[in-house]
Image (cartoon, helix red, strand yellow):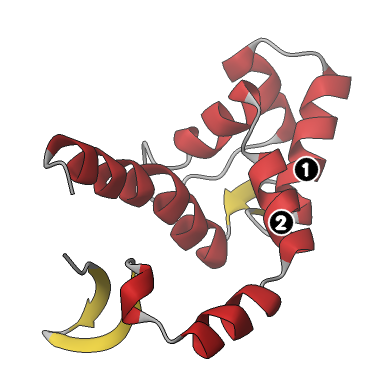
Amino acid sequence: MNLKILLVKDGKTIFELPLTPALWSCKKLKKELQELDFEYFLKLFHALSNIYRLKMMMKFFEEYGLMLSFSDFMKEFNLNPKVVSENIKKLQECNLLEKSRNGKYKCSRVGEIEFLLISIALNRVLKFIYENNL
């Protein structure tokens, strides 16, 4: 059985990614693995490995375009300033959050895509694979 993930835009496949090693040539797979930016993935996964940072990111998806101030984070999650500051910094290091001119934070465009890929998309794909014994 061979599996692929397709990225479709306006009904047209613009990207496909094999999920089965048999669909890769050994040379191509080796090259892809060598080109991985492990430092970035470590930062990204570390940033999302904390329950407060996950909740902070999830908050931005409750209302599209939501912007939160530093004190909003403190009130919403009942956290002290040091914890809020450290968590915001980790999310900014991975470009998940950005600070606007008015001092409020919002999910960056790249952050929206990365968070949805890592949370919902990955969860749904893996759940489907497990439930269907693929």
- Whether the residues at callouts 1 and 2 have beta carbons within 8 Å, the answer is yes
Relative side of 5 to 61, left or right: left
Query: Which of the labelled discs sits on residue 45, or is there none?
Result: none
Residue extending farthest top? 78
Q: Is residue 99 visible?
A: no
Choose top left, top right, bottom left or bottom right for residue 8: bottom left
* In the rendered image, the vertical position of residue 61 relative to residue 86, given as above or below: below
Residue displayed at 75% across by 39% down: 88
**Given the image, on which type of amino acid does mark 2 rest?**
Cys
* In the rendered image, the vertical position of residue 26 relative to residue 54, given as above or below: below
Residue extending farthest right? 82
The one nearer the camera, 13 or 84, is 13
* In the rendered image, the vertical position of residue 60 relative to residue 107, given as above or below: above
| Label 1 Cα crowd, 10 Å radius (few <14 / some 14-19 / many 20+) | some
The one nearer the camera, 123 or 79, is 123
Relative side of 119 to 125, left or right: right
- Distance in Å between CA atoms under marks 1 and 2: 7 Å
Where is residue 112? Give x, y as percent: 47, 57
Choose top left, top right, bottom left or bottom right for residue 31: bottom right
**Residue at the disc numbered 2:** 94
**Residue at the disc numbered 1:** 90
Where is residue 22? Give x, y as percent: 33, 75
**Given the image, on which type of amino acid does mark 1 rest?**
Lys
